[in-house]
Image (tube, grey):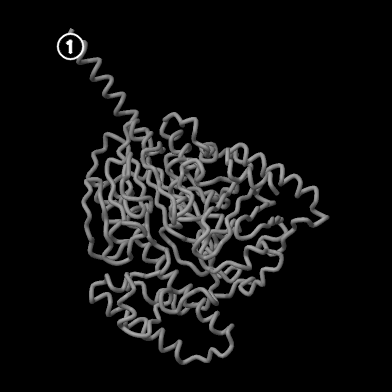
Amino acid sequence: MNKAFTFILFCALSISMLYGQKRPNIVIIISDDHSYQTISAYGSKIGSTPNIDRIAKDGLLFNRAYVNNSLCGPSRASLLTGKYSHKNGYKENEKSHFEHSQNSFVKELRKAGYRTSWIGKQHLGDTLEGFDYFDVLINQGHYFNPNFKNQKGEMKREKGYVSDIVTEKAIGWMESLDREKPFCMILGHKATHREWNPDPQDFGKNDGKKFPLPDNFYDNYEGREAAKIQEMQVSKDMKLDYDLKLFKSEADWMKESNFFRMDESDREKYRSYYAKVKADFESRDFSDPKKLAEWKYQRYMTDYLNTAESMDRNIGKVLDYLDEKGLAENTLVIYMSDQGFYMGEHGWFDKRFMYEESFRTPMMLRYPKHIKKSKKVNDLLMTIDIAPTMLELAGVAVPSDMQGESFEKIIEGKEGARKQLYYHYYEDGIHNVSPHFGVSDGQYKLIRFYNKVDSWELYDLKKDSKEMNNLYNNAKYAEKQAEMMRKLKEEIKKQDDAEAMLIFEAS
């Protein structure tokens, strides 16, 4: 009897271990405000991202991945829950509170035997649930000597540059694991968030480049009322001190949190580097406002790209670890940003709008066990689709209340299921962007602005990829406008967005 029981138990354990080995490990690397326009895998001629590109070269490059709410915290909340902001409760950074007790794909994986972790920036508070291990930045975090809080409730100020620290913690956690069970790790980078502070070793990486102005850098926003009132223009809203580090005095610079937190050795490198930038600034004639705007744009791009290089190098360390430890074959790696970002298009920096540069996000996936060669994917998908996809790939049932649509079929080389994109941005604060919601079918996009601005916009992305010509109430597009209105109402109803429905029906 005991021998029979022992044999049955041994078989059960063996099957369990075999099943565990077959299930993929999952590594999701999520950066902050990293634009697809500056990633060389997307054809960028100005960005240098060789390690991020490795993921695309070995897997899938998603050309049409989108977010449901282009803002840091809400985007991460939707990634975790597979739900739109109005369902997971985290609509905006300034006023929302994320309820960690709600379900997430990570909790489902953990119940199914996965070891789980979130390391780095999450920006959803510091009382995480569903993770065996977490060590997260406090709020936005700092680039230098940042504070972290772990699952034991311990708060610690770590010494060094944030991208290095997050990477070391991630590799350390993976190194601590045995190989009996699969793992899911979400690695959150602070880069490339404003104020774009590079690791000093990356100073000079992009300084010699001349960045061409986007064609619509001097957009006059004709026919787009919400765009007229925003406060995210490089020319007037980007600050010489806070953003571009041209402080009037040492005392002023010491008030800036990242500079204040640096070790003196890094601080001296920053002083030396930006002294040259300041000298260049002071040597120029800015009597023509356009010259100042264009100088600021060049500096913005340089700092941004140098910061991206600091992050990219660290992403390479994680990929190297997976390769060296023999984990790469059965580890699914996703690289993504929490949203897109404006690199001077429309004259802007930041995000928030449903226009493509902000709405669309970089995303790529490597899974050698199932994806043997690189492929560019043009199917529509959204970041809320990641949660159900990860569960399906792990053989875990997808909760019925998840609103995302799995793209497992795309990974298998088949056509994706998603036909429409729904978006809703709520925050009515910084950068003065009017709340809005809308729908896109990949070619046509309809947007409803409300609160600050009461207006509609319609675009044909095939003819107007830069969204300069608002076609709403254009007689030639009356039929298409009516069709998109029907699609928007269908999406609002399907996603049960009561607030949007009230606004839509009152229009």
Classify residue 74 as left or right of residue 262: right
Q: Nearer the viewer, residue 77 or 226?
A: 226
Residue at x 47%, y 37% (from the top left corner): 388
Q: Looking at the image, which residue sits at the far left?
A: 2
The residue at which mark 1 appears reads as 3
In the picture shown, does residue 162 fall above or below 421? below
Classify residue 167 as left or right of residue 427: left
Residue at x 23%, y 72% (from the top left corner): 263
Residue at x 23%, y 76% (from the top left corner): 264
Q: Quadrant of residue 164?
A: bottom left
Q: Position of residue 423 (x, y in %)?
A: 58, 49
Q: Looking at the image, which residue sits at the far top?
A: 1
In the picture shown, does residue 441 fall above or below 281? above
Q: Position of residue 32 (x, y in %)?
A: 43, 58
Element type at mark 1? helix
Badge 1 amino acid: Lys
Q: Looking at the image, which residue sits at the far right?
A: 475
In the picture shown, does residue 154 fall above or below 431? above
Q: Quadrant of residue 317?
A: bottom left
